[in-house]
Image: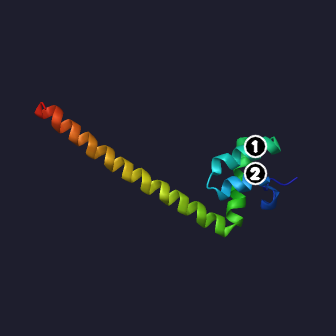
């Protein structure tokens, strides 16, 4: 028996839909439930599917980039707000 992951086409439809929505974790959960497999096997199957689908990989890369940009904007806003609060606390209102 081979240790290679199953062909990409073997993923459940719900897992493929989750991937196209940008939700890799949900896809892994679906594969685990429907295949009754462990985390590593499910993760390997999902990763193999992503690698076999260049358009999907590009979309997931875009989702990741967008999430990183949103986090950076949030972090900058938080730091500016924190600096403002610190200024007023130190100054004594």
x and y percentages locating residue 23 in the rendered image: 63, 51
Whether residue 45 can be seen here: no
x 54%, y 59%: residue: 63
Q: Which mark is residue 42?
A: none
x 68%, y 63%: residue: 51
x and y percentages locating residue 73 in the rendered image: 37, 53
Whether residue 1 can be seen here: yes
How far apart are the alpha carbons under marks 1 and 2? 12 Å
Secondary element at tag 2: helix
x 23%, y 42%: residue: 83
Q: Is residue 77 above or below residue 6?
A: above
The local crowd at label 1, few if under 14, some if 14 to 19, many if 20 or more residues have their Cα within 10 Å, is some
The local crowd at label 2, few if under 14, some if 14 to 19, many if 20 or more residues have their Cα within 10 Å, is some
Q: Residue furthest left?
A: 91
x 71%, y 52%: residue: 44
- Tell me the quarter of the image containing the C terminus: top left
Quadrant position of residue 9? bottom right
Q: Nearer the viewer, residue 43 or 81?
A: 81
Q: Going by the image, does 59 lie left or right of 10? A: left
Q: Nearer the viewer, mark 1 or mark 2?
A: 2
x and y percentages locating residue 91 in the rendered image: 11, 34
Kindly identify which residue carries mark 2: 14
x and y percentages locating residue 26 in the rendered image: 67, 46
Q: Residue furthest right?
A: 1
Secondary element at tag 1: helix
Kindly identify which residue carries mark 1: 32
């Amino acid at each position: 028996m081979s240790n290679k992951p199953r062909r990409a086409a073997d993923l459940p439809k719900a897992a493929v839909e989750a991937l196209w929505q940008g939700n890799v974790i949900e896809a892994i959960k679906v594969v685990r439930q429907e295949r009754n497999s462990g985390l590593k096997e499910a993760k390997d199957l999902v990763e193999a599917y992503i690698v076999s689908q260049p358009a999907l990989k590009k979309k997931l890369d875009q989702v990741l980039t967008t999430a990183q940009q949103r986090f950076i904007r949030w972090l900058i806003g938080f730091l500016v707000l924190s600096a403002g609060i610190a200024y007023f606390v130190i100054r004594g209102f």
